[in-house]
Image (cartoon, helix red, strand yellow):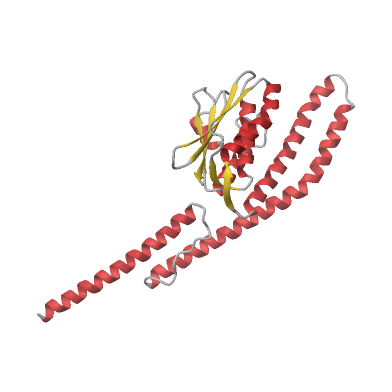
Amino acid sequence: VFALLILLVAVALGYVLSTSLTRTVRQIGQAVEAIGQGQLETTAPTDLGPPELRRLAEAINATAARLIRLLELERTFVENASHQLRTPLAALQLHVENLQGGLEGPDVASFEPVRREVARLARLVSSLLEMARIEAAPAVVSTVDLAGVARERVDYWQPFADELGIVLAYEGPESLTVRAVDGVCEQVVDNLLSNAFDASPSGGPVRVTVSSNGTGAHLHVVDAGVGLSEDERHAALGRFWRGTPETEGTGLGLAIVDQLVRLSGGTVALLEAKTGGVDASVTFDLA
């Protein structure tokens, strides 16, 4: 009987210890998963479990803190460098345009690549400053009428579409509210429409649609361009991606869209459109 009692006590203690260890390991695992998803402020519990698990949790927290510090240093460097470059680039752009204005004949055409590259560098600096501003700003999510924003931005872009011979149309409800950071929806629609206009040939359609499936709100901006391969669609959301070296732009437009949408708790995907172009798909949480 005494031996049986000892066995029962041992089993009970083993169960309690294993349950405690499992709970601690689970909490540490959840913290690591959150950190891996970019939630670097998440901390693993350092007051639970045996010393080995506590030291592991402390190491995880220290690594996350170092990552936060490195990202802050990177953001500060980009912001400072961009500020320092903006004024001389603006002056250089003005000088280049003045020089080009004084040229004649073939010299004008030969000078055009220089002017375009200086203009691209100026846009790049502005985009870097925009990304630094987004990363530094607090993410205050509020209720936004996504459908209303999309309709308003389509109306704004309509004259540009007419000038380029692009058939721009909106499809969707009059109103559909989502959870997003204030101003994000406007910037997202503008950036996606700018990309769609660049990709679409004259006479081609660009369609903006807003819909809901009950669990989320979906914004689609579809162009009729030549499209991208699956690898290109995946890479295009990264910073500084350009289809070819000759492609106009900074390679930051879609990266800014992705950053803005993630700041609002949403997702972005580039899909293959039925028209052969790109379907830029954005999902927000319903309000």
Q: Is residue 28 left or right of residue 71?
A: left
Q: Quadrant of residue 245?
A: top right
Residue 231, position as x, y percentages in the image: 50, 33
Q: Residue at x 50, y 61 (%)?
A: 42
Residue 149, position as x, y percentages in the image: 61, 38
Judged from this view, the residue extending furthest toward the right is 102
Q: Residue at x 17, y 74 (%)?
A: 8
Q: Residue at x 58, y 42 (%)?
A: 145
Seen from the viewer's position, the closer of residues 43 and 64 is: 43
On the rendered image, what quadrant is the N terminus found in? bottom left
Judged from this view, the residue extending furthest toward the left is 1
Seen from the viewer's position, the closer of residues 165 and 258 is: 165
Q: Is residue 174 left or right of residue 117?
A: left
Residue 32 higher or lower than 82, as above or below: below
Residue 260, position as x, y percentages in the image: 59, 45
Q: Quadrant of residue 197?
A: top right
Residue 50, position as x, y percentages in the image: 37, 72
Seen from the viewer's position, the closer of residues 202 and 181 is: 181
The answer to whether residue 241 shows anywhere in this view is: no
Judged from this view, the residue extending furthest toward the bottom is 2
The answer to whether residue 256 shows anywhere in this view is: yes
Q: Count every numbered label the image shows and give the total.
A: 0
Q: Is residue 15 left or right of residue 182?
A: left
